[in-house]
Image: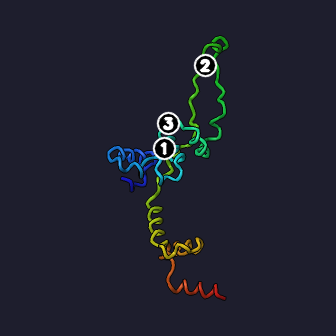
């Protein structure tokens, strides 16, 4: 179920919450505030936006980039005739304050594969490697269908001159 490309953060959070409910030992790894979650306020804020729930102050700050520009502006209410004006106002449709964040997927399979391949490259023997060199090695590994040994040798020779 977690491999679907149509899965939203809200759905993943719902699945993880069910797993934690059934297997409490997984709470340390799957809870919304688990150590593996880099930006818990952002994640919980996006989940709440997808569910249409109210945000906390911290979630509002980190989700502010998704706030619609004119959502905070007051909407001028139209009034009926002069007699009814003091007693009755037309209802104004409530506008969404934030844009739809359903387009933000949980970590994609491609990213997971990339992280796994980096883990294979970034072994104990390469821990002292400069990040720039590591990036080049991983780029070559990830795009290996675009080059062969001859291409690398040609580039190495041209850079030596």
Q: Please provide percent x and percent y for residue 52.
A: 49, 37
Q: Nearer the viewer, residue 19 or 5?
A: 19
Dot 1 falls on a residue whose secondary structure is helix
Q: Please provide percent x and percent y for residue 97.
A: 58, 37
Is 41 positioned to the left or the right of 160 in the image?
Answer: left
- Above or below residue 149? Residue 74 is above
Q: CA distance from mark 3 to mark 2?
A: 27 Å
Q: Please provide percent x and percent y for residue 56.
A: 55, 38
Quadrant containing the C terminus is bottom right
Dot 3 falls on a residue whose secondary structure is loop
* Structural crowding at the residue carrying mark 3, measured as other residues with C-alpha within 10 Å and reported as few (<14), some (14–19) or many (≥20): few
* For the residues bearing labels 3 and 1, Cβ distance under 8 angstroms: no
Q: Nearer the viewer, mark 2 or mark 1?
A: 1
- Above or below residue 46? Residue 157 is below
The residue that label 3 is drawn on is: 53
Q: Residue at x 64, y 84 (%)?
A: 159
The residue that label 2 is drawn on is: 89
* Structural crowding at the residue carrying mark 1, measured as other residues with C-alpha within 10 Å and reported as few (<14), some (14–19) or many (≥20): many
* Structural crowding at the residue carrying mark 2, measured as other residues with C-alpha within 10 Å and reported as few (<14), some (14–19) or many (≥20): few
Q: CA distance from mark 3 to mark 1?
A: 9 Å
Q: Please provide percent x and percent y for residue 48.
A: 49, 40
* For the residues bearing labels 2 and 1, Cβ distance under 8 angstroms: no
Q: CA distance from mark 2 to mark 1?
A: 34 Å
Check the image and name the residue furthest to the left. Answer: 22
The residue that label 1 is drawn on is: 47
């Amino acid at each position: 179920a977690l491999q679907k490309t149509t899965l939203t953060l809200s759905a993943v959070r719902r699945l993880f919450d069910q797993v934690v409910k059934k297997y409490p030992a997984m709470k340390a790894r799957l809870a919304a505030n688990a150590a593996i979650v880099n930006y818990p306020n952002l994640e919980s804020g996006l989940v709440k936006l997808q569910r249409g729930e109210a945000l906390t102050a911290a979630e509002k700050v980190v989700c502010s980039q998704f706030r619609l520009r004119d959502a905070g502006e007051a909407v001028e209410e139209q009034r009926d005739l002069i007699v009814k004006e003091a007693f009755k106002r037309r209802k104004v449709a409530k506008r969404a304050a934030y844009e739809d964040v359903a387009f933000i997927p949980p970590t994609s399979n491609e990213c997971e594969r990339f992280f796994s391949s980096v883990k294979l490259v970034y072994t104990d023997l390469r821990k002292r490697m400069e990040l720039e060199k590591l990036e080049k090695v991983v780029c070559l590994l990830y795009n290996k269908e675009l080059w062969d040994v001859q291409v690398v040798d040609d580039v190495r020779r041209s850079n030596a001159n």
